[in-house]
Image (cartoon, rainbow, N blue to C red):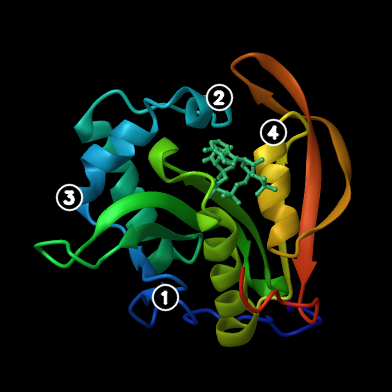
Amino acid sequence: MPYLVPPLIPPGRLADSVQPSLPVSDGLLLRPWRCADAPAVLAAFADPAIQHWHLRRADTEDEARDWIDQWRNAWYCETGAHWAVVRPEGAADGTGKVLGRIALRSLIPAIGQAECAYWVLPAARGRGIAPRALSVLARWAFEEIGFERLELAHSVLNEASCRVAAKAGFTLEGTRRRGHLHADGWHDMHVHARIRGDGLPDRL
Ligand SMILES: CC(C)(COP(=O)(O)OP(=O)(O)OC[C@H]1O[C@@H](n2cnc3c(N)ncnc32)[C@H](O)[C@@H]1OP(=O)(O)O)[C@@H](O)C(=O)NCCC(=O)NCCS
């Protein structure tokens, strides 16, 4: 059956191009994941805070590499877009030290919607990396790709994530009761969103 409205983001908009790297202020870069990032992903999921707010864990570098493969393939399947947040300067191989992750997942290209996800390694927290990465991601998604609405959800107990959402201009829209089952039980979830045309924080 034909659709009544044309897709907001036509098929191939992501898959027909190479996933870009996106500069962030203060010399940071969002770059596509590489297999060599597996130790950093493994280290991230050894952190109790990252573990607390995620549904899965990685126990070995092979598992971390499998995840990275899935993140890379998501671009070509147009189901997600995942970046490492890195500081490239000074890295001998130019690829940069991984500081965190930022992603779009649950893409619905036809109506230009996706969900944002992020974590930052413990040593890099408290420097505004997540909100800056999220702002750059949102600008790219709205201005370069044509998304209409980006959503993010976090447990009402995850105050740091709530701050990230607020600083990146994601309005709190409400609470999804028992919205997520984490390892320690059900969590009510704050739902934040930014839609095309909402004010973009220029710099954070
Ligand atoms: C939530 C998270 C991504 C924030 O990243 P960040 O780059 O540290 O973000 P910010 O620097 O803007 O700090 C956000 C808040 O974290 C808190 N914070 C500050 N320094 C911190 C530190 N060293 N360690 C932990 N939290 C800190 C503050 O409340 C801060 O808000 P404020 O700037 O209004 O004071 C990061 O703490 C993290 O990865 N947490 C574990 C995984 C997670 O919660 N992911 C999100 C799931 S929805």
Q: Is mark 4 within 8 Å of ligand 1?
A: yes
Mark before the other along the chain sequence, 2 or 1 = 1
Q: CA distance from mark 3 to mark 4?
A: 30 Å
Q: CA distance from mark 4 to mark 2?
A: 10 Å
**Residue at 46% over, 77% down:** 14
The secondary structure type at the circle numbered 4 is: loop
Q: Amino acid at mark 3?
A: Ala
Q: CA distance from mark 4 to mark 1?
A: 27 Å
Q: Are marks 3 and 4 in contact (CB under 8 Å)?
A: no
Q: Amino acid at mark 1?
A: Leu
Closer to the eye: label 3 or 4: 4
Closer to the eye: label 3 or 1: 1
Q: Nearer the viewer, residue 132 or 117?
A: 132
Task: Return the residue at label 2.
Answer: 52
Q: CA distance from mark 3 to mark 1?
A: 19 Å
Q: How far across and how far down the image is residue 185, in percent? A: 69, 15
The crowd level at tag 3 (other Cα within 10 Å; few <14, some 14-19, many 20+) is few
Task: Return the residue at label 4.
Answer: 158
Task: Return the residue at label 3.
Answer: 36
Closer to the eye: label 4 or 2: 4
Mark before the other along the chain sequence, 3 or 1 = 1
Q: CA distance from mark 3 to mark 2?
A: 25 Å
Task: Return the residue at label 1.
Answer: 22
Q: How far across and how far down the image is residue 160, in percent? A: 66, 40
Spot the residue most to the top. 184
Q: Is residue 156 left or right of residue 177?
A: left
Q: Is mark 2 within 8 Å of ligand 1?
A: yes
Q: How far across and how far down the image is residue 37, in percent? A: 24, 48
Q: Amino acid at mark 4?
A: Asn
- Disc on res. 170: none
